Amino acid sequence: PARKMYSGAGRAGGASKNNKYDGELGFIRGRGEQSLCFYGRGRSASRVGACRSASLLATFDGACKGNPGSTGQGSVLFDCEGAPLRERLGSAGKTTNNVSEYKALCNTLELALEEAGEGANLLILGDSSLCVMQVCGQWNVTTDHLLPYRRRCHELMQKFDHIALCHVKREFNAYADAVANDSVSTSEVATHDRDPTQPLERLPPPG
């Protein structure tokens, strides 16, 4: 069957009743965009078309307690109606905030590939302007240790038919931020599937 497209509405066609999701869904309704870059196999879609044709929405964030310090990565995958499907928690040990953001984006791309397979259309949101702009080629990578992470992101992004990668304000990334902060003490990447019969609320950390 044809894959449903992301509509920007909450579950059952209405707005989300849980303010944990209002930021992410509000972005899709046009209230939070700061910048948007395209990547993937298909690069000819319009800005509006990229958002409307996405079959999945994903958000990512990195957390760092001290810089450098203990880090965590949060990834959240939403379905085409805005309900959370899965979240991924990760830890990169002691490193910098920028490395944590890059690793969070890599984790998110891997999560989306696991869910949708190659050739999917993905809309992905993050609040790290450095990570988003460097990956999209808008900014140069001026520190060599970030180059392998950007290369890994590019390798993963080429597996999608189209990606709209967007930089958004922090308030439009609250869910992934919460997951990232939960992940700071997590020793390995963990994947959680969301039970669609449960109320809309953030998934608990592993344990």
Image (spheres, helix red, strand yellow):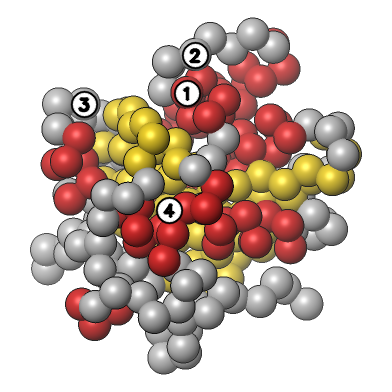
Q: Residue furthest bottom?
A: 197
| Label 3: element kind | loop
Left of 46 or right of it: where is 77? Answer: right
Residue at the location (46% across, 88% down)?
199
| Label 1: element kind | helix
Residue at the location (53% across, 79% down)?
201
Left of 1 or right of it: where is 181? Answer: right
Gap between marks 2 and 4 measured at Cα: 22 Å
Going by the numbered disc 2, the residue's amino acid type is Trp
Mark earlier in primary sequence (2, 4): 4
Mark earlier in primary sequence (4, 1): 4
Q: Position of residue 60 (x, y in %)?
A: 54, 48
Which is in the foreground here, disc 2 or disc 3?
A: 2
Q: Which mark is residue 43?
A: 3
Going by the numbered disc 3, the residue's amino acid type is Arg
Answer few, some or many: residues within 10 Å of disc 4's Cα (few below 14, many 20 plus, some between 14 and 19).
Answer: many
Task: Say which residue label 1 marks.
Answer: 133
- Which of 115 and 130 lies nearest the eye of the viewer? 130
**Looking at the image, is 118 positioned above or below residue 28?**
above
Residue at the location (72% across, 17% down)?
145
Gap between marks 2 and 3 measured at Cα: 19 Å
Left of 11 or right of it: where is 196? Answer: right
Quadrant position of the N terminus in the picture: bottom left
Gap between marks 3 and 1 measured at Cα: 16 Å
Which is in the foreground here, disc 2 or disc 4?
A: 2
Quadrant position of the C terminus in the picture: bottom right
**Looking at the image, is 206 positioned above or below residue 158?**
below
Q: Position of residue 186 (x, y in %)?
A: 80, 59
